[in-house]
Amino acid sequence: MPQVATKAQNEWFFHKLKADPEQYADYLRRARERRRAYHARVGDDVINARARAKAEERGHWPKVKRRTPEWKASQKKLKKIQKAKKAEANRRLIRNLKRHPCRDCRRLWPYYVMQFDHREGEVKCFEISNKGLKCAPARLLAEIAKCDLACGNCHAIRTHKRRLALVAREMWEQGVGV
Ligand SMILES: [Zn+2]
């Protein structure tokens, strides 16, 4: 019958060991060496198989065989459904948030006319209508918070004005017309 330390004995051993950092570091180094030597002697495959057998014995390892073609196919299908559901939820969220009047003309338009326009000075991380459908709701809301809600017309006017301002600034910087 091999002598096995009790839990209390183990705890006491590590308590004493950790009291001296140098001694503890030395212990960890030797343990690492022992583990490496064991792996080199026995081989990773055998060690993995042993660990697996042990886990199976304890009931930790799932009995169903994973990574089979059927399992992979079902996972793929599941992911697809989950993605579609997520996109649908985000789409609904975006449409609900679009039920507000346009920031510029103050008129109420249907959701398919409304657009989120990133305010000037805000860092645009992604397009709301593109990546916004795939990302987490919190990220989507954070991105929408950087935007003004404008109808298609007003958005086009905003963009045009911005472009004009940019051209004017570039001309000014180059010293044209001074
Ligand atoms: Zn408008």
Image: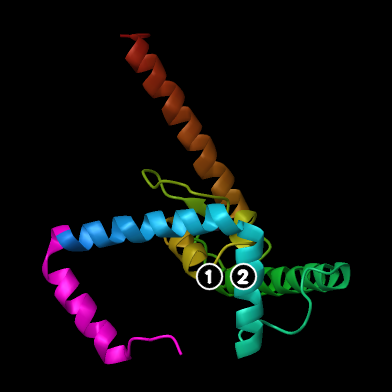
Magenta segment, principal secondary structure? helix
Q: Nearer the viewer, residue 99 or 96?
A: 96
Classify 151 as above or below 80.
Answer: above
Give the image quarter of residue 15: bottom left
Mark seen at residue 90: 2
Q: Quick one: SS at disc 2? A: helix
Picture residue at 36% right of the left edge, 43% below the top: 121
Residue lying furthest right: 70
- 155 left or right of 10 in image: right
**Which residue is the site of mark 1?**
137
Q: Quick one: SS at disc 1? A: helix
Q: What residue type is disc 2 on?
A: Asn
Q: Are marks 1 and 2 in contact (CB under 8 Å)?
A: yes
Quadrant position of the C terminus in the picture: top left
Inspect the magenta stretch and tell me whether residue 20 lies in it.
yes
Image spot of residue 101 (x, y percent): 52, 67
Image spot of residue 23 (x, y percent): 17, 61
Classify 101 as above or below 148.
Answer: below
- Give the Cα distance between marks 1 and 2: 7 Å
